[in-house]
Amino acid sequence: MNNNEIKDKLVLALDVEDINEAKKLVDDLSSYIGTFKVGLQLFCGYGLEIINYIKQKNSNFFLDVKLHDIPNTVEHASYNVIKNGANFFNVHATGGIEMMKAARKGADEAAEKYNRKKPLILAVTVLTSISQEVLSNELSNNKTVEEFVIQLAKNAKIAGLNGVVASAKELKAIKRELGSDFKVLTPGIRPKWSLKDDQQRIATPNSAIQDGADFIVLGRAITKAPDRIEAIEKIYEEIKEGK
Ligand code: C5P
């Protein structure tokens, strides 16, 4: 895998409190990272300011907003997400097929109107914070987490979404059931030399990519590293060497 192919797969989670820190991460890492992910923390704090900064750098911009509402609202929100410069965002698959179709429609209409590339829309299936016990007892769902993840991924595909967010544990099953073109973005990535933090189901960057991840989310492994450039270069080396 060459440097550009690796860069395209890397997503950096800008989970920081301060806008200047987010901007510094974008400045320092935009030559290594293909996509910057802005989550609710930063977006609710600073909105369009961080979006415009990322856009200037020509990086992909993933708005991790996990939309979940009635189809009409999601359609118009998706339109605005693309209008405002994200080319990558997500919705909750539990909102249903009609809602996901509405996201596709709104996003594609904005991309056409504003001459943007085709938006990538991923579905969040079952949050990793939902255990089997919560799914069965609190949510009265009689499926296993894995069965439910696969069903929701199938719904996302029917609705025309590009893929799903899933842990490394679910990666192979999703690719097997949904096909290799159906994209999977995998968080919970930790190189061997990095702290696990609060993540339970972790994989190394190389193993997630070997198992078929199209995108891997790097967060604290990079943002909290004593030397961020050294850390990202080490990850490139490990992916290239397949270890
Ligand atoms: O710092 P760390 O690598 O744990 O960050 C992971 C990122 O991926 C965070 O932005 C987190 O919200 C996100 N994420 C996750 N697990 C999921 C879905 C998203 O950790 N199931």
Image (cartoon, helix red, strand yellow):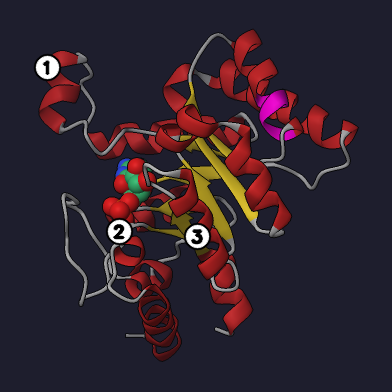
How packed is label 1: few (under 14 Cα within 10 Å), some, or many (20 or more)?
Answer: few
SS of the residue under disc 1: helix
Residue 214 in sight in this render: no
Asked whether mark 1 lies closer than 8 Å to ligand 1, one says: no
Could you tell which of marks 3 and 2 lies nearer the N-terminus?
Answer: 3
Give the Cα separation between the discs numbered 3 and 1. Answer: 44 Å
Residue 24 numbered tag: 3
Q: Is residue 79 magenta?
A: yes
Image coordinates for residue 61, horizontal then vertical, percent: 61, 48
Q: Quadrant of the C terminus?
A: bottom left
- Magenta stretch bounds: 78-82
Question: Viewer-nearest of labels 3 and 2?
Answer: 3
Q: Is residue 31 magenta?
A: no
Image coordinates for residue 66, horizontal then vertical, percent: 47, 29
**Residue identifier under label 1:** 137
Q: Quadrant of the N terminus?
A: bottom right
Q: Amino acid at mark 1?
A: Asn
Residue drawn 33% across and 72% down? 207
Asked whether mark 2 lies closer than 8 Å to ligand 1, one says: yes
Could you tell which of marks 1 and 2 lies nearer the N-terminus?
Answer: 1
**Residue identifier under label 2:** 220
Residue nearer the viewer, 15 or 116: 15
* Residue 138 falls in image quadrant: top left
Residue drawn 66% across and 25% down? 78
Image coordinates for residue 206, horizontal then vertical, percent: 37, 75
Give the side of residue 40 with respect to residue 120, left or right.
left
Give the side of residue 222 with respect to residue 110, left or right.
left
Q: Amino acid at mark 3?
A: Lys
Give the Cα separation between the discs numbered 1 and 2. Answer: 33 Å
Give the Cα separation between the discs numbered 3 and 2. Answer: 15 Å
How packed is label 3: few (under 14 Cα within 10 Å), some, or many (20 or more)?
Answer: few
* Residue 59 falls in image quadrant: bottom right
